[in-house]
Amino acid sequence: MITSPLFLKFIRSAPDVKEEEVTMILDHFTILQVKAKDHTVREGEICKHIGFVNKGCFSYYTLSESGRKSIIHFAFEDWWTGDLQSFLKRQPATTYWQALEEAELITINRSDFEHLCKISQAFKYLFDLKTQTAYIKILNKSAKDKSETAEEKYLRMLEEYPQIIQRVPHYDVASYLGIAPESLSRIRNKISK
Amino acid sequence: MITSPLFLKFIRSAPDVKEEEVTMILDHFTILQVKAKDHTVREGEICKHIGFVNKGCFSYYTLSESGRKSIIHFAFEDWWTGDLQSFLKRQPATTYWQALEEAELITINRSDFEHLCKISQAFKYLFDLKTQTAYIKILNKSAKDKSETAEEKYLRMLEEYPQIIQRVPHYDVASYLGIAPESLSRIRNKISK
């Protein structure tokens, strides 16, 4: 049985959810320990689980044909991991999910997910709301990414995710901002002055 | 009563939806004619409707403090328009929606939307699925935008939305690609050779 207070808080945030339904939802999930640097999804594989980050931090990225890494975003505690398209449509993933630290995921597989969406209105509500919130977030980010300079992007990132600097390697932060590591060093030096 | 075949097809795509429910859903919508260049949403205003594009084409953009326009995406027939965050949370919008051609929207207001989500499982299903699909689409786009050159972005755009070139002004295509109009002309010339 899952006892994570963070995950319980998330499930109990569904409106009017009864404790029996909470227990039933929890019964569909499993704890997965992930070592630092391990991948939970790789391009070309079918993504078999989505997971709630109970502990740790992940990077979600793509590799171009030339091997260039582009980080779409990071996922800290209370976020979800997994290649959604691959998971929902049972298609090969186009992305990678990698643990940047030793991590703990609370995961659900595809058939349990489908079953749970059918039998639990509360879970379906939470999943749809999370998708909606994530969609609005990435729309806002996408708009800002286009209009801001690298320095503005860096300052916005610090405001939104102050933990990134402590937990994410310099090289990955640069990839997330879409700039060279040297440019990130210059921005950091300029700001610290 | 709405008779648009495109919209009817969309509503009837909900699994096992009965004709009485289709009629009930249609009764919650209104046709809105929009003149070319008119805005249906502006930054700072509350977005009171979301709309299905029955005819025409819209640009969805933000303006930076210095007045720089960043186009997030375009919406053609069968897409939805509206600042989702503003609409759902009744907050001031942070984006603009502008008709690039004379257009026709099939719209629903906030209270009718809330009511319809409660009484129609089919409509709720369609709205959640549309959000999920749009989320997956923008995640993929976001990853590619980071790793591709302007020319690669242009070629991908032509593949995904061949109608953009015929229907969207050169200046707006450049803003969508995040490049100067002169750079877009250079890419076009290079490709046509």
Image (cartoon, coloured by chain):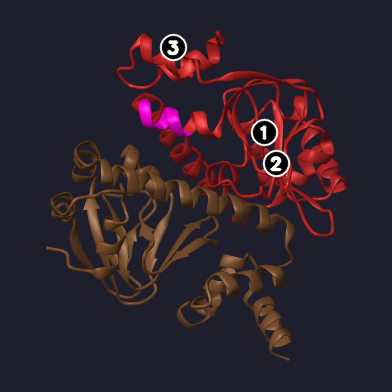
Chain colours: A brown, B red
Residue beneath disc 2: B154
Residue type, label 2: Tyr
Residue A72: x and y, percent?
Answer: 52, 59
The crowding category of the residue bearing disc 2, from other C-alpha atoms within 10 Å (few below 14, some 14 to 19, many at least 20), is some
Q: Quadrant of residue B189?
A: top right
Cα separation between marks 3 and 2? 41 Å
Give yes or no for contact between labels 3 and 2 (Cβ–Cβ under 8 Å): no
Query: From where the camera sits, is residue A18 visible?
Result: yes
Are discs 2 and 1 located on one and the same chain? yes
Are discs 3 and 2 located on one and the same chain? yes
Q: Is disc 1 placed on a helix, strand or loop?
A: helix
Q: Which mark is residue B158?
A: 1
Cα separation between marks 2 and 1? 6 Å
Chain letter, disc 1 residue = B
Give yes or no for contact between labels 2 and 1 (Cβ–Cβ under 8 Å): yes
Residue at 66 percent across and 49 percent down: it is: B92
**Image position of A179 with respect to B30: above or below:** below
Cα separation between marks 1 and 3? 37 Å
Residue at 41 percent across and 31 percent down: it is: B117
Query: From where the camera sits, is residue B81 visible?
Result: no
Q: Which residues are magenta?
A: B114-119
A88 lies left or right of B84: left
Residue beneath disc 3: B23
Chain letter, disc 2 residue = B
